[in-house]
Image (cartoon, rainbow, N blue to C red):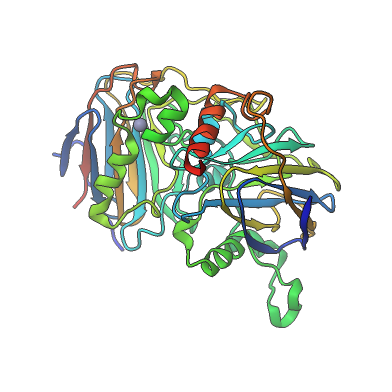
Amino acid sequence: MSLYLHDMPGGAAWSAPVSAGRLVTLTALGDRANCSMLLLNADRVDRLNIPDTLKAQMSARITAPMVLMSDRGLALASVVASSLDWHDCLTGFGSEAHLERFGATSYAADRNDWRRSARTGLVSELTKHGLDERDLHAPVNFFTKVAIAGDARASMTFVPGHARAGDSVTLRTEHDVLLVLCTAPHPLDPGEYAPSAVQVSVEVAATVAQDTDPSWNWREESARALEMSRRVLA
Amino acid sequence: MTVTEIPTTTAATLDLTVEAGDGALVRVPAGGRLRIVDLHGNQAADTLLFDAADVRNKYSAFDTIREQGAVFLTTGSRLLSTRLDELAVITEDTVGRHDTIGGACAQESNVIRYGEHTRHQHACRQTFLAYGAGAGIGPREMGHNINFFMNVPVSAEGDLHFDDGLSAPGKYVELTASREIWVLLSNCPQLNNPCNGWDPTPVQLLGWWS
Ligand SMILES: [Zn+2]
């Protein structure tokens, strides 16, 4: 059952509390989408921990059916579907310095088309919830791939055109979370400034069958994180 | 500001041995050099950096690796903050590469990785919080750390592993502070994977500054 849809224009930031047991689907509405996501637990202290998420599931990217884990070892959300096998989580979000190459911008000159960085947008959203830059953490950059080379330094290269209009990813919330999103361009995207819009859909998730659910059965580590969340909500 | 270079052949300002499972909070002035020595080899030294003038301006693993265009840290790596300020530079490295995407161990992540029986084993996160308190560093100020001497290979296919370290007894890494910083270190007590060679051992901190 769809609860609501919300379209975020490119270059925008948004936040929403989302209850446990919801499906949140992000859909790219153009070929240049990047959607950076922060995720905080209901207490607003515990938050997404990308290093713990990666090492527990032996991955350097985010894709289905991985579980997104918090500082305190809880499953905040599970990636239950994804049209892409790689969402970046190693390269953070952009700052004002990354927008300088596009020239000067301001509300006075550009009205609501003014260019603001992901950092500015994410901090602005955090501030609305009584939080601040201390609560920034490594995001998932949905729809973006930064390839890792097999060289001695593990060099990283932005992959243009990784996602296309219509690509989507669906998260199932495992806790009451605060979702913080920003559709500013990825800082390594060498293209012109033309970030795509992203649609956010929130619906009620079906009851989880632990014995067949792909996230519960992905790895023992994924299941243990989900079990710790189940205990908190039980 | 003018920084007077002190050669590392002169007596160290700081000479501190950090036992396995213990930590340290060290204030390093701009231009100061801090050497972390892996005394017995294969010992993960989990490290966070903060701008001493404002601890909200903390080390950012993922800004650091994006701006250098490579996952591993080594000589020349500029260690950036969440505001993209340069906190320090790795100026010497006899190991070759260090991890910054593997995070620190915590009791809670140990339970996820190894099972409920590890719940009450000592872990880096409480060392960070215990020593960080002295500089006003709490859970909100925590960031994603550097794991000096730790080897976490990543592949082009997007896989990640924890491997035996490339380090060896006496190998070291040296940071030069770009501004006055706090260095918050946890000498990792992890017993459940090869990051400490299954046997955590001490590291030595040597500092040169005026
Ligand atoms: Zn540790």
Q: Is residue B203 above or below residue A70?
A: above
Q: Report the front residue among A192 and A171.
A: A171
Taking the image in four quarters, ligand 1 sits in the one at top left
Name the residue: 54% across, 63% down: A126
Q: Is residue B85 above or below residue A130?
A: above
Q: Report the front residue among B26 and B106.
A: B106
Looking at the image, residue B75 sits to the left or right of residue A150; the answer is: left
Picture coordinates of residue A58, whole percent (x, y): 56, 25
Picture coordinates of residue B14, whole percent (x, y): 17, 42
Name the residue: 33% across, 18% down: B168
Q: Residue furthest front?
A: A234
Q: Report the front residue among B175 and B135.
A: B135
Name the residue: 75% across, 49% down: A26
Count all numbered tags in the image, as a single digit: 0
Q: Report the front residue among B65 and A65.
A: A65
**Residue A192 appearing in the image:** no
Picture coordinates of residue A127, whole percent (x, y): 52, 68
**Residue A152 appearing in the image:** yes
Q: Quadrant of residue A87?
A: top right
Picture coordinates of residue B36, whole percent (x, y): 28, 34
Q: Residue furthest bottom?
A: A108
